[in-house]
Amino acid sequence: MAHEQEEAPRSHRLLAVGAVAFLALATALAFGRVFRGQAPTLKLMAAALASLAVAALLERRSPVLAALASAVGLAFALGFLVFPHTLWHGFLPAGNTFHEIAKAVSRVGQQTRVQVAPTEALRPLLMAAITAMWTATFSTHALAVRSGSPLLAAVPCAALLAFAGIVLGDGPRRGYAALFLAAVLAVLFIDGLRRVRQWGPLRPWRGATRPRLTSTTTTRGARRVTLAAVGVALLIPGILPGFRSPAALDAITGTGSGSDINPLVSVTSSLQRSDPIELFTVKSDHPAYWRWMGLNSFDGDRWTTPDIDVSDGVELGPDSSLPGPTAGSVVQASARVETIHQDFHITAPPGKWLPMAYAPNQITLPAPGPFRFDPEIVAAVPLAGLVSGLEYQVTSTVQVPTYENLNKDYDFSQLEAYTELPEETRNQIRPIARDVVATAKAVTPLEKALAIQEFLTSTHFAYDATVSGRQDTRSLLNFLTNTRKGFCQQFASAMAVMLRSLGIPTRIAVGFTTGNPIPGGQYRVTSLEAHAWPEVLFPGYGWQPFEPTPGRVNPLTEQITTPASERTGGGTGGRPGPRGPDPSHNRFDNVPPPGGEFSSTREGGAQGGGGGPRRSYGGLIALAVAVLLGAAAIVIPAWKLLWRRSQLRAARDPRRRALAAYRVFASRAADIGLARGQGETLPEYRARLQREVRFSDGHLERLTRTAGLAAYAPREITEREASDAVASGRTAISEIRKDVPVYRRVAGLFRPSVSG
């Protein structure tokens, strides 16, 4: 029996790696949908290919060594693709790289709670995605090639595919599912070929038009099974009940979602729903904003409060008076006070907190209905939960000071907790805020607040509910100086941070706008009315709401936004009239916004709402292509060099060393276009090379004769014969390289094949 000329067919190994690459790229394409633009998807593809290259290069090494090398490769990939500014000399990960990685790891959880897919490729999220893609690809290769378990190999990639469908809410997209299934079938088919080879060699059969591995009869059934499987995968999901239907428990409900859910996440999710739903109706003798709570702290990434689930609040009975006002909220004799009675009926629970007008002094729940109340953030949570059909009553006392009441200087020295900002945030936002108040010639805290509110409602900014819900400092700076597009979350957060940077105590309130009036003095509130707005603390008058979001009007704030001489709806009694200032006469409309020159010819400029220049992903795409080419220029030659050396080092006896010498020779000849043909015998290959290249001293003959003896002769090969084969192979390939043009030798360095 002839000895196998190779330990494992090189063509099969390349086919296996190619099938895994197909599966990884299909997964990266589907997984990349969670980000906006094409650049993140290209980065995920680059990470998948790099991970596969490391895995294939170390395929025959210890799994521990391969895992360690993969970890090192991941560090390089994160440096190149996510943190290129931290690389030492633009190439090697440095201490700053790992510092940025650790910092991003600490922010991944918060960003996943806040962002709504598809999101911008923020560094923490992109780092997590690339890590997941790298790990999934490495695991897929290990299971498919090392362990020979093709079905298990599909699990890591299937998890990423499912994750993308879940966070985007579009389920199994047929195109991506079909591509993924085709890749899985390719992995299964290659594994099947490997198992068939164990029974004996596969002989090629040359048909009339092209060579085939097997006969038409052999593969006809496989083709039919493949087509049937793909057809079933595409058609069956569409006829299943509930396909593409919304989830039974939607993200905006907030019930059972854990104690760390930020209500701003619910606002973002609600506004970006394609199918708004009714949340509650409220009967009230006065229109108001229905408030959930106040968020007192900004850490540079998000607005929050330590007691967001009201777990530290006071437990009260179903019909209890609430604790008195917090510091700074004492009712002034000079301010008008209104009492608002509200009757709520919950249709679909909008969250765990009770909506109510600020500031409540009594809550009546159905008995037995205890609830927790936090007077600091003014939020209430029923212990039995907020459920559909719940009816409750709230009485609120509202101070309605006038412009003249509030327009004076204040001592905020005892309220520093509400002016705290990270130093980086303060340094970046304060210059913009100062420019705004200087342009408006604002002096008092009220004038400064109104100046910033008027700036944000000018035509430099536009309302757009499709943007990401991120709140970090970089995003706020980009919103104020570049995009100038957003929804209530961006406008409220920008105003609050700008005021805090000027030393004025401010927080974010979260809840709902008034809603749509219906007969019977009621208002219907849907998910579209989810809202956030800033509140400013004026000592003696408490927290007063402002409205910087374009197109929104708080019915209780008109009297503090304009002097009595400019108000149109009456001064001190009855309901406030429409908002005093005419939006068409905003003093900031014709003033260049801080952070850049204003031009009417700028794309999306004053006439279009200040959208900023259109984004182009050409630079990122070019970067991704450059990274891929650079990685290929490094990885491919190194991969081939290490593979060829490993072939000779792994040969433990003369026979194997002689065969390895021939494999290395044929592989290097293939680099410059002189590969051994499929089914070509050793003498036939030698004769063809001798016709194309001038050889001397019979080196090719000696190599071919020794390889033939090692493959077919019953006697053992001597150490001297094996050493001569290695030397002859090196000399023969050197003569071939001297006889071909330079461009073929250079191109051969980057040819991906390693087998001859």
Image (spheres, grey):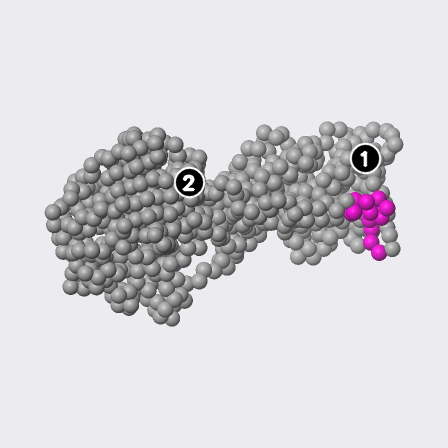
Which residue does the image show at 19% across and 51% down from the upper left? 400
Task: Determine if the magenta segment contains residue 212.
Answer: yes
> Real-space Cα distance between discs 1 and 2?
77 Å
Which residue does the image show at 39% across and 39% down from the upper left? 390
Tell me if 676 is positioned left or right of 255 in this view. Answer: right
Tell me if 231 is positioned left or right of 130 in this view. Answer: right
Task: Determine if the magenta segment contains residue 487.
Answer: no
Kind of residue sitting beneath label 1: Glu
Q: Position of residue 248 (x, y in %)?
A: 52, 41
Residue that numbered label 2 is attached to:
389
Kind of residue sitting beneath label 2: Gly
Residue density around tag 2, few if under 14, some if 14–19, many if 20 or more, within 10 Å: few
User: If you read the primary sequence from the N terminus, does the residue marked by circle 1 or circle 2 appear first?
Assistant: 1
Does any portion of residue 306 appear in the rendered image?
no
Q: Position of residue 556 (x, y in %)?
A: 25, 53
Which residue does the image show at 19% across and 45% down from the upper left? 542
Residue that numbered label 1 is attached to:
4
Q: Position of residue 465 (x, y in %)?
A: 41, 55
Residue at the front extreme of this rendering:
520
Q: Position of residue 726 (x, y in %)?
A: 74, 38
